[in-house]
Amino acid sequence: MTLHLPSGPALALGAASASYQIEGATAEDGRGVSIWDTFSLVPGATKDGKDGSVACDSYHRYQDDVDLVADLGADLYRFSVAWPRIIPTGVGSVEERGLAYYDRLVDALLARGVTPTGTFYHWDLPQALEDKGGWLDRDTAYAFADYAMVVHERLGDRVKVWATHNEPWCAAYLGYAAAVHAPGRREGGEAHRAAHHLLLGHGLAAERLHAAGSQDVGIVLNLAPIWPEPGLPPEAADGIDAIRNRVWLGPLVDGAYDAGLLRVAPVLADPELVREGDLDLIRGSADWMGVNYYTPVRPGPVEPTPAGDVRHPETDAYPGAEPVTFVVREPRTDIGWEVDAYGLEELLLETYKRTGLPLMVTENGAAYADDVVADVPGVGRCVQDEDRRAYLEDHIAATERARQAGADIRGYIVWTLLDNFEWAEGYTKYFGIVHVDPQTQERTPKASYRWLQERLRG
């Protein structure tokens, strides 16, 4: 089998974005309502009370953004398709104007020599499907596969590398257990149903995409190294690892949910949920795997934490696991996540050992305040973000070390191109290598962008 993933001697580099975070234009050209449109209107759902209705206005300014990608010298641009733009109610009639937008985006990238890589689902589920149960309902998996085929039939002649889902852990557990992401539900262990249906949707889509000739169908997971704190019982650490990592890797690699996972998620043994043939369909369905990494996970005993440590806010996102305290050590980014590049190196090596699949780092980056815009001699207006530059340098180096140690890693993709709508954080956290003025939409490359640009120029 010939993969279209990058395969040269050098690590391919790129930048990433997601539809709801940058596009705006949520009520234009027939786009339907998404769960994030609805969730963002709930008081307190986002830190600043704002939503993605305008975001970076990339629906209208995509040519400017493609220019930024090209000027960066990027090999790849990872984007996601908004399901509500294509099939506004999730099933049924297809919106031609939505497909035409992605036609224009893909053609603009190719015209500038940038390879587009697409993601079918980056969390913007049509609200009409959520009204019928969302990812807790098995029918959503079939609707997803139908939608993926509509997009592939339109773009597959030019976009060769596809991911089905981005971070299904967030969609399932932050959305249906912890209620900090859309649709904002607290369903406890029922969230495991969402996890299975997301995997089923991946498997159904992959089967049909492969039948249509696609050779590069992957899935993007926010796997994490689990580093238990002293005193944590082994079964507690195992439960966290099971829900964060093995719930995905077990079905994808072995076609099974392991005993440790079933201990904390017994619903996954229900034959009405996990039906005959489901796990066989999912096993071996990915041609490659995307790894999103930001920070390690340090579960500790439920006791007062050492001075300087803080609790991680996602403690409800592991339903069925023993209670733990998530410890975050220094240094931290502006969003409060621990910085440790070794975690990426370890994760890549372990994931390659576990899966044997070609890997891409599909997201890696850091939120920092970036509140100073200065005039730099020879450059002009620029945001100084030395902390982000150092973060990226360290994590690219970690990726290279894992590659040299034998992991088949094809690319490293920075999160993210633009400062954007950062989900529940609203517009209070900035991951971009390009600053976006929320009033004027003016784009200003940051120092990290200039550094990466020089690196890519070699």
Image: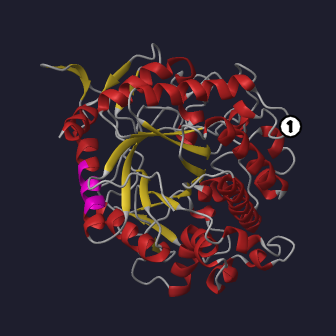
Q: What is the span of residues highlighted in magenta in the rendered image?
A: 393-400
Left or right placement of residue 124 versus residue 347 in this view: right
The residue drawn where x is 25% and y is 39% is 452
The answer to whether residue 316 is magenta is no
* Colour approach in the figure: secondary structure
- Residue 126 visible? The answer is yes
Q: Could you tell me the amino acid type at mark 1?
A: Gly
| Residue 323 seen in this snapshot | no
The 10 Å Cα crowd at callout 1, few under 14, some 14 to 19, many 20 or more, is: few
In front here: 450 or 446? 450
For mark 1, give the secondary structure: loop
173 or 433, which is in the foreground?
433
Quadrant in the rendering for residue 75? top left
- The quadrant in which residue 426 appears is top right
* Horizontal and vertical percent position of residue 261: 64, 79
| Residue 69: x %, y % from top left | 37, 31
Q: Residue at x 36, y 51 (%)?
A: 412
Tell me what residue is drawn at x 24 percent, y 57 percent: 397
The residue indicated by pointer 1 is: 92
At a point 58% along the width and 78% down the height, the residue shown is 239
